[in-house]
Amino acid sequence: MLPVESAAPAEFREDGRGKMRRTALYLLLILALPGLLIGQEEGGQGSEPAVIPAAVKERLARLLPEPAEVGASRSGEQKFFSADLYEHIDGGADVYLDYGLVAMLHEEYKASSTDITLDIYDMGAQSNAFGIYAAESSPDYHFLPIGTEGYGTDEILNFFQDEFYVKLSAFSDKEKTGPVMERFAQAVSRNIGPSGSLPEFLSLFPPQKLVSHSCKFVKKSPLGHDFLAPAIMASYAWGEKQTFLVITKAPDPQGAMKKVEQLRSYFGRSGKVVPQPGLASGAFLGSNQFEGEAVFLASGSYVILCINPPPNLESFLKSVIERIAEKGASISF
Amino acid sequence: MGLLSSDCLWAALPPSMSIAHYKSSPTEPDGIAEEARRLTRQAIEALGGMNRFVSKGNIVWVKPDIGWDRRPEQAATTNPDVVATVVEMCYQAGAKKVLVSDNPCNPARLSFPRSGIQEAAEKAGAQVIFLDERKFKKMSINGKVLREWEVYQDAVEADRLINVPIVKNHNLCHATLGMKNLMGVIGGPRNRLHQDLGGTLVDLAAFFKPRLVVLDAIRVLTANGPVGGNLADVKRKDTIVAGVDQVAADAFGATLLGYKPESIGYIAQGNARGLGTINFNSLSPRQIEV
């Protein structure tokens, strides 16, 4: 059996401190919104960097490790980005902005012969931080127990924790860079606080046959459909066969039925769609040249879309519906 | 003297595109450097040699992708030996001066040395330039999206522009190829350029019209571009493309990333606006196995 991601519901609950911090941040952002908007406008017109409220900058700066703590010295100019992130990562910025980037802090260090760059992205919410982290990761990466979850190679180490996505890169011609990046990562993680657990919405995925580290949170246009946003997705492996499970939530059951109707219409236009009353009430099987075969249905306020359905489709769907019934009411995304 | 038939004349013309592929896929740094140099040289020679593009006394601006603080192995920047070979061939063709630069996203003081391009190009005799903000001048682009924009003056004033991009994934436009690489000779706020990226890139391609494109696909970043960093995202394609048609070169590059060229907005737009052909096979590219 393939390794599965643990999904104990209790681990997903926020502590009170996290909620207070988030509430404080939202208040801060509401107060700072005019400034942020002005910053975006200025960035759009030309020459000035985006305006980032001082409190947001201070909050990010407090997460930096003390140079002595990590055996390094600062070696470059500290920079902040928000709507002007394009200046730092060009077209890569779009995805970060789609996930609600609040601000990013870039800092450079030198430790012996190693150059280190540290980028801390404040994504405003844990779901967003997980979303961008997962968007940039792949199940075949080397995962590490840093922050809530991370991965690394010889020259990069990325992790997410709370509403932060932290990216380190290091280069040296003389020494291994892994230990120094790990030192930095642990120091930043400590400054953020408790390592936390994966977002609660991931507990909707049945763990059996789930491909480890395949879960995603897609905020914009999942599978190219705006009406499915936001959605969570994961892969399941049945030997050689891979199934792709997409779950999205509407405000109420009528909204979920509407999304099912939109899917029915889409498959009708692009291929064919037939009801599957034997499988579940209101279930459909759609097929086209893009997705291949897909089964979809509503379950309360949720919509389940199963692409390339598994051999044991009925029991698989049953397990998804049961988890939604058990956990779905308290989950939002 | 007998008249040549049009078929004979056609056959006598050098091809406008070549695709050089290395049979083996060496893993040692020296082997990859040798691969890069041989593929680049043979791809350009298949087009008739660098003399076709560079004349005696020319000042040549060579534009690789040096935008990122990444090592060559991470495939976010152009292979340094490809750049060095282009520089050497320019001098062998009689160039007076070869300038190599980029307007990087990450600081040039990091990305230029880390990419290996600074050292390799300087060894080949190029001047590697850290761009001077004061030399960006607002110029008339006369494009559909860009009416005027800040352009690096020395790049425009050079006699020849040779575009030397790397093939890589791009989160926004799927693929970073030659036309996208031209963003490195302009200034101004990048976020405005991304509001209509496809139209912008075609405007830039029409404005700069590089004399030659040398597309590096030795290592290809297949995910998380343009920045990348994770070696798990890098795949070997062991290929160099050289060509005079920037749309065709990009169209072929897109296929290396698994995309249909028509699905990449700026390639389709470049084709529609007559900047080149999306149907690279119609150019009968010279295929070379090395």
Image: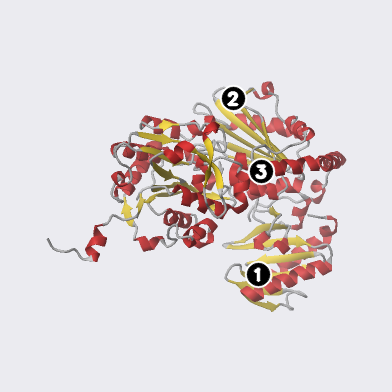
Residue B21 location (% of width, % of height): 36, 51
Residue B135 location (% of width, % of height): 51, 34
Q: CA distance from mark 1 to mark 3?
A: 45 Å
Pointer 2 or 1: first along the chain: 2
Front-most of residues A159 and B105: B105
* Residue position marked by numbered label 1 in the rendering: A294
| Vertical order, A109 against B155 (above or below) | above
Q: CA distance from mark 3 to mark 2?
A: 35 Å
In the rendered structure, which amino acid carries the disc numbered 2?
Lys
- SS for dot 2: strand
User: Dot 2: within a 10 Å radius of its alpha carbon, few (fewer than 14), some, or many (20 or more) residues?
Assistant: some
Pointer 1 or 3: first along the chain: 3
Same chain? Circles 2 and 1: yes
Please tell me whether mark 2 or mark 1 is closer to you in this view: 2
Front-most of residues B85 and B98: B98
* Residue position marked by numbered label 2 in the rendering: A110
Residue A205 location (% of width, % of height): 73, 58
